[in-house]
Amino acid sequence: MAPPTVSLVTPSFNQAPFIERTLRSVLCQDYPHIQYIVMDAASTDGTVDLLRKYEAVIDVLVSAKDDGQSDALNRGFQHARGDILGYLNADDCLASASTISQVVRCFEEHRWADAIYGQRYYIGEQGEFTLIYPYRPFSRERLYLTDYIPQEAAFWTRRIYDKAGGYVNTAFHFAMDYELWLRFLRVGANFLAVPDYWGLFRSYAGQKSQALWRTLGVAECSRLQREHLGREVGEPGMWNVFMEHMYGAPPESHPESCHLFYLCWEAVVQHHKQTLGGARLDGWVDHAPVNAVRAKNLRAARAA
């Protein structure tokens, strides 16, 4: 049996400070059977020059105006031919050169799973470690109440994607991943959480997920909750459930228990900071080679 192909899509717009690290985190994977699709919205900040630098090893590269991130993802996945799918925003990275190998192995070992997600490291603008949350098993009930799945560390099968309609919902400009997870649940998807770290989520001033959370994110999440639950949870409710999921007790009704676990976990976070000493977690892309087997296969396919 042929090894599965993993199709990854990166939507991009004016992310020149980060895009090369994102690209290399995919192109330097040790797993050769990756189809990489980059959809750039006609960036004007030097991003296109960086994309052209790697054009020979990107399967599909489009630089043209679009209608936003969801539109770029939707059009990107239309090119996807992989058995396993995922997407990586242009300021995030895969956590190591073996991430996709781990993903494929997990799907092979858990053939019942339709979507598998690992954990994320939060990193700063320079790639320095800032935060981790404890590993928690998947909870269907809590996912309806709050989105706790780390998008850049999440992957799913083509089968469940097609069963759920085979599209990214362009009516959502912030919570398009949450909308996809809930649509997967609607068609009976089985999710699996694993403790391995697969994603590096970059958090910095001006970032979309911070800048638009209250003006757009809360409204879109509430819209999804009305559709799937018949009621809104609201921002305080979503945060309460998120904290309960991570720390074992809801701060609203059990503040002391939640705070105690939080303090214990904060010691773990501080230990990581001291141990890493400001090292760039995305620094692995600087010395990792572009996968030569994948590059050779891509050249051969283009020449055929």
Image (cartoon, rainbow, N blue to C red):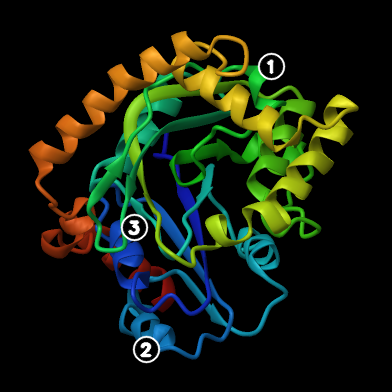
Say whether residue 12 is visible.
yes
Q: Are marks 2 and 3 in contact (CB under 8 Å)?
A: no
Q: Which residue occupies 56% across, 27% down?
A: 242
Q: Are marks 2 and 1 in contact (CB under 8 Å)?
A: no
Quarter holding the N terminus?
A: top left
Q: Nearer the viewer, residue 115 or 22?
A: 22
Residue at mark 2 to residue at mark 1: CA–CA distance: 45 Å
Tell me: residue 303, above or below residue 113: below
Tell which residue pokes out farthest to the front in this image. Answer: 256
Amino acid type, residue under disc 2 in the picture: Asp
Q: Which mark is residue 26?
A: 3
Amino acid type, residue under disc 1 in the picture: Glu
Residue that carries the numbered disc 2 in the rendered image: 49
> Where is residue 162 shown, x and y percent of the image?
72, 42
Residue at mark 1 to residue at mark 3: CA–CA distance: 33 Å
Q: Nearer the viewer, residue 156 or 208?
A: 208
Q: Which residue occupies 39% across, 57% down?
A: 92
Residue that carries the numbered disc 1 in the rendered image: 141
> Where is residue 195 shown, x and y percent of the image?
35, 23
Question: In what element is the residue under mark 1?
Answer: helix
Mark 1 or mark 3, which is nearer to you? 1
- Crowding around mark 3 (Cα neighbors within 10 Å: few <14, some 14 to 19, many 20+) is many
Q: Which residue occupies 13% across, 52% down?
A: 279
Tell me: residue 113, above or below residue 2: above
Question: In what element is the residue under mark 2?
Answer: helix
Q: Nearer the viewer, residue 107 or 153?
A: 153
Say whether residue 297 is visible.
no
Amino acid type, residue under disc 3 in the picture: Val
